[in-house]
Amino acid sequence: MNIFDVYPLLDLEPVKAEGNYIFCSNGKKYLDFYGGHAVISIGHSNPHYISKISEQLNNIGFYSNSVQNPLQAELAQKLGALSGYEDYQLFLCNSGAEAIENALKMASFHTGKSKVIAFNKAFHGRTTSALSVTDNDKYTAPINESNNAIFLEINDLEAFKQEISKGDTCAVLLEGIQGIGGIRLFEDSFLQEVESLCEKHNVVFICDEIQSGYGRTGAFFAHQHAGITPDIITVAKGMGNGFPVAGTILSPNFEAVHGQLGSTFGGNQLACAAATAVLEIIEEEQLIDNAAIHGNALFKKLNTLPRIMEVRGKGLMIGLEFPFPIKELRQQLINQEQVVTGVASNPNVLRLLPPLTITKAEIDHLFTALQNVLTQHVYQ
Ligand SMILES: *Cc1c(COP(=O)(O)O)cnc(C)c1O
């Protein structure tokens, strides 16, 4: 059997990883400014993470959700304490797309409606409903197109007011910071208006923090920079540091009804151990502060790069827009400087999503690497 060839691959085969580096089969070591797609939050091969997962696996790795599993409550409590959402409720699943599916489903149960206001260039996952609220023709098949989703330009308050006042909206769905779309930010004032208009019109406000959450932007959730509280929050990427675990976080206004949501693998003992270890390390190593401090320092420097058009983002979620496609630049960062970075759906945007454990020396390394390739090569 062959692998179904859906990804353009880099010529890299990681065989080991430690801290903020990956080690490849070519014998070289690469600085990880991509985090395996914003997934590696606490760095690679953290000893506490490894031992917590190993111990759990030695005891019990999996049993179905039909039995008691106090590890789930322990995880929910820790997540509530660190995020400031103590009174919210956690539903555990396995991937970001599932967290979105469950969020949309709960919003629809709650309101009895189905229209969703989403935003241009949004990405919410690859299942059928998640794609129906994703704005990218490359990912979407005819079966994913729904009449339920309306896409608006980000920060267009007039269009938003007009749409939501029609009274037929079930949910507003937006990313804390748009990730794959090219690191695009919602204005604080726009988010505050969304929050109050959702409340006024009885619309469920869903914030997708799958990429922007878990401390990456220097707050536990990116939306917290705007001082707002959505009704539902989705989490995934940084939550398990690579172990597949995700969550739909619901306000106390949502009442659980047996049968409405469920998952075979979701919230299993091993997933809970991994996710709890991640939170313990985020807290212990003060990684949210680290993201803020190093992210802000890096942000200022990046604006001085040659040929840079715009630097966007918060904390360690940064997009660099150039006046040329970054494909070659990214390849040269790998070949010449041994630094791995990420792409976006906008071909001119390079995405920086390092582990939150990144150090000042590694930030400097990245900056020098960028300076080197930008001064030594001609890009057009
Ligand atoms: C990656 C991502 C998803 C989808 O997560 P999967 O685990 O790949 O299903 C959804 N929303 C955002 C913002 C993402 O970045």
Image (cartoon, rainbow, N blue to C red):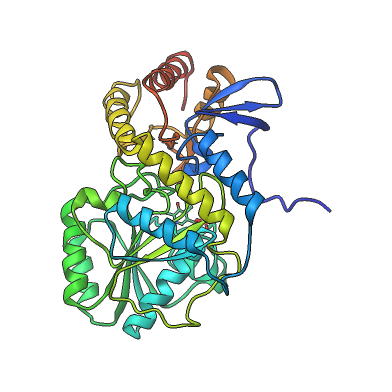
Viewer-nearest residue: 321 or 123? 123
Q: Is residue 68 left or right of residue 223?
A: right
Q: Is residue 120 left or right of residue 355?
A: left
Q: Which residue is depicted at the point 20% across and 65% down?
A: 195
Q: Which residue is depicted at the point 40% across and 79% down?
A: 256
Query: In which quadrant of the rendered view does residue 13 lie?
Result: top right
Q: Position of residue 229 (x, y in %)?
A: 23, 61
Does residue 26 show up? yes
Q: Is residue 343 left or right of residue 67?
A: left
Single out the residue that lies furthest toward the right: 1
Q: Position of residue 159 (x, y in %)?
A: 22, 66
Single out the residue that lies furthest toward the bottom: 112
Q: Is residue 44 above or below residue 249?
A: above
Viewer-nearest residue: 310 or 102? 102
Q: Is residue 53 left or right of residue 211?
A: right
Q: Is residue 223 above or below residue 307?
A: below
Does residue 12 show up? no
